[in-house]
Image: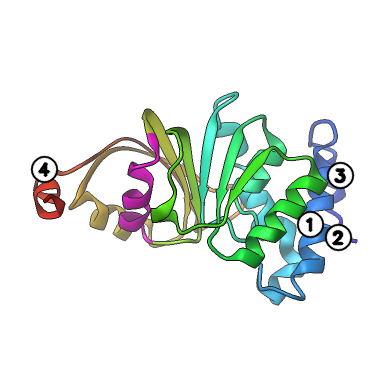
Amino acid sequence: MFHVKPETVADLPGDLGPRLDCFAEILTRWNGRINLVSPRDLPHLWDRHIADSLQLASLIPPGARLADLGSGGGFPGLIIAIATDADVTLIESDQRKAAFLRESARAAGARVTVLARRIEEVDIPPVQVVTARALAALPQLLEWSSRLLAPDGFCLFLKGRNVDDELTSAAADWHMAVSRLPSRTNADGTILKLGEITRARHSERATGP
């Protein structure tokens, strides 16, 4: 069985450590059949994936409704669902990965809805938070997220060393309030919190009827 670092478990409240351990055990077992994470990453599953996703949990408002884009192996959406009381919708078009998400959520006691559909086909009530990790460049993430967010909602995206280039590219078509938080698990990583997201007027004309 995969076990999270003992010194980290000691810092986690209640039964969170064992529930994350349960999730990691299932992921390790399924990873032999479908590619959830790189085999090279399995010995570092806690640091590179679980802990990286877990740092978003404290940024989720209590009781928020959340949509996670391209949930894949459960990062970050399923980890957030395990760690918080958020109502999380996991969007994953791959049917096998969607089956993994359902099974691991059930075993870890997470409250999630898994939608095995393409992101652009999803039709759900507006959510307070949209999350994504290692999925797409920022302009595409904003295109997907803008139609899912409530008016006062915001996005949380885990980004790497190219974050400045992505922000510059996105600014050509989008206006937004940007907050940047340093990642606690990746020296080159950044947590982007983006709110007040609106399409630039010239972009509206370009994409309109």
Q: Nearer the viewer, residue 122 or 22?
A: 122
Q: Is residue 146 magenta?
A: yes
Local crowd at mark 2 within 10 Å, few (<14), some, or many (≥20)? some
Amino acid, disc 1:
Ala
Q: Earlier in the sequence, mark 1 or mark 2?
A: 2
Amino acid, disc 4:
Arg
Please give the name of the residue rendered at 74% of the width and 47% of the height, measured from the top-left corner.
Answer: 105
Give the Cα distance between marks 2 and 4.
50 Å
- SS of the residue under disc 3: helix
Local crowd at mark 3 within 10 Å, few (<14), some, or many (≥20)? some
Asked if disc 1 and disc 2 are in contact, CB closer than 8 Å, the reply is yes
Give the Cα distance between marks 4 and 1.
45 Å
- SS of the residue under disc 4: helix
Q: Earlier in the sequence, mark 2 or mark 4?
A: 2
Amino acid, disc 3:
Pro
- On residue 18, the disc is 3
Amino acid, disc 2:
Phe
Question: What range of the chain is rendered magenta?
Answer: 137-149
Give the Cα distance between marks 3 and 1.
10 Å
- On residue 2, the disc is 2
Q: Is 140 rendered above or below residue 181?
A: below
Residue 113: x %, y % from top left = 62, 43
